[in-house]
Amino acid sequence: MLSALPDAIGILLSFEGLSVLVLGTVLGIVLGAMPGIGSTVAVAIVLPFTLTMSQAPAIILLLAVYAGSVYGGSIAAILINTPGTPQSAATCLDGYPMAKRGDAGLALGWATIASVIGGLASAVVLIFAAPQLAAVALEFGPIETFALILLGMTCIVSVSTGSVVKGLMAGMIGIFLSTVGGDPILGEMRFTFDNWQLFAGFNLLAVVIGVFALSEVFVRASAPVSKVSELVAFKGIVLPGWSLWKGRLRNLGKSVLIGNVIGVLPGTGAATAAFISYAEGRRSSPNRERFGKGEPDGIVSSEAANNAVTGGALVPTMALGIPGDAITAVMLATLTLHGITPGPKLVDDNPTLIAAIFAGFFIINLLLLPLGMLLSRVAAPILRVREAFMMTAIVILCALGIYFVRGNPFDLLVMGGAGLVGFLLRRQGFPMAPLVIGMVLGPTLELTLRQGLILTDGSFLAFFTGHPIALVLALAALLALSLPLLRVLRAGKTHE
């Protein structure tokens, strides 16, 4: 991959490369600062517009929006006590109290420095861990790949907030949607009802935009109007001096480590990392009695951890093709839409692309500092925009993006239908990430299963008797599926 670095740098220094680095980070910060949009919706909004771009700039644009939105959420959390993204919920606990006492600029300064350091650390983890993890699985055949995808499907359990059963049902819906169209082995049409528009299956992009962005609009339109907190006085970011960091570096390092470790684990996410880091910071900080009253350690704990998750979460997604949460599921779909197959051979098959992504991700996190200082003053007035206008703009952007990709009105119907179904499922407590994971991993799961059955003369048992790696992966998948059930049974015995 080092030999591909000069070509990767050339891509990043081109006009298109520099544009996506800056524009993507700007969009991410602004969209992340708007309450209710969130990182997943922000990435989904931009996704259709990347399909007219070449591979490396398209992926880098989405990574910039992703990283920028995680940081941008802290702006709303600190200024109006409303997290722009779920990842910044813990930042409200100390960020807003500090802002209320007149230190909004300093509070955002703590958040900015912690975010940059957390993001840079996660970029280093991504650069070194992803190729190593991919190298382990490089020799996998169809049977081992099937077992790996089977293990990846179990992350549906981990991303299923609330009922695991509903998460599994959503995943099954996604797998069913992936079977619409041509059979991967025989080429016969399935579930098309003689509609030629479905011969190639459902447009993955339209489904992703529908179940995430459009359903979010429907959910928010049906919810009671909430009153936005008053904007505190803010004149710009004030970076904390070196003397103020005395005694806080240990907490910063610990928070970065927590974020990176949790980021690599499928199904946890940045919000979980932020609260775990905040709890650990409160336990170990010498200023623990000031937590919740505007303590900088609380802001550092939250923001360093949630930004450190970004690179770590991409490690299993890129190296193994296993998404760990809703955002990485969208990223996985993006790679697929651009003709890139995430998994063990990704680094070897696309060295220049991967080098550009790694270097670009590092630069994106560096850009958070200057762009954050510049855009925070711009984003503050945007927080006063009425939610109805914001949601209308999202619908228009989604429709334009979907239509201009292929110019096919049927894609708009698919997006609308997916949005409506997503809305109804969400109202009943069904998570959306499993549906997309099932739809993205479904084709590979079916293809490798069919190939494996051909190699073993139709014996599914031979998958595991003659392939020890597949057996270990299948047992790991079975254990991952059994853990929630064991927790339920254990909780039942405790209450008896």
Image (tube, helix red, strand yellow):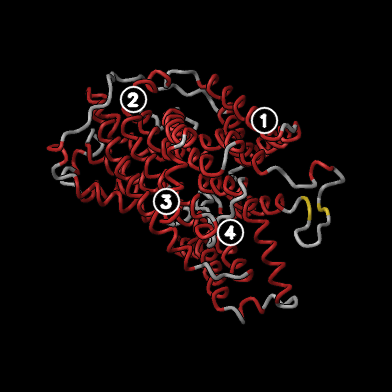
**Observer-nearest of 490 and 246:** 246
Q: Which mark is residue 374?
A: 2
Label 2 sits on what residue type? Leu
Name the residue carrying label 3: 5
Residue 388 spot, x, y in % from top left = 55, 20
Badge 4 marks a residue whose secondary structure is: helix
Q: Is mark 4 in CB contact (under 8 Å) with mark 2? A: no
Q: To which residue does mark 1 refer? A: 404
Q: Nearer the viewer, mark 1 or mark 4?
A: 1
Q: Earlier in the sequence, mark 4 or mark 2?
A: 4
Which sits earlier in the primary sequence, circle 1 or circle 4?
Answer: 4
Which picture quadrant has residue 92?
top left
Percent of width and height locating residue 25:
42, 33
**Which residue occupies 62% across, 51% down?**
440
Spatial distance from mark 2 to mark 1, Cα to Cα?
32 Å
Mark identifier at residue 153: 4
Residue under the point 77% across and 62% down: 185
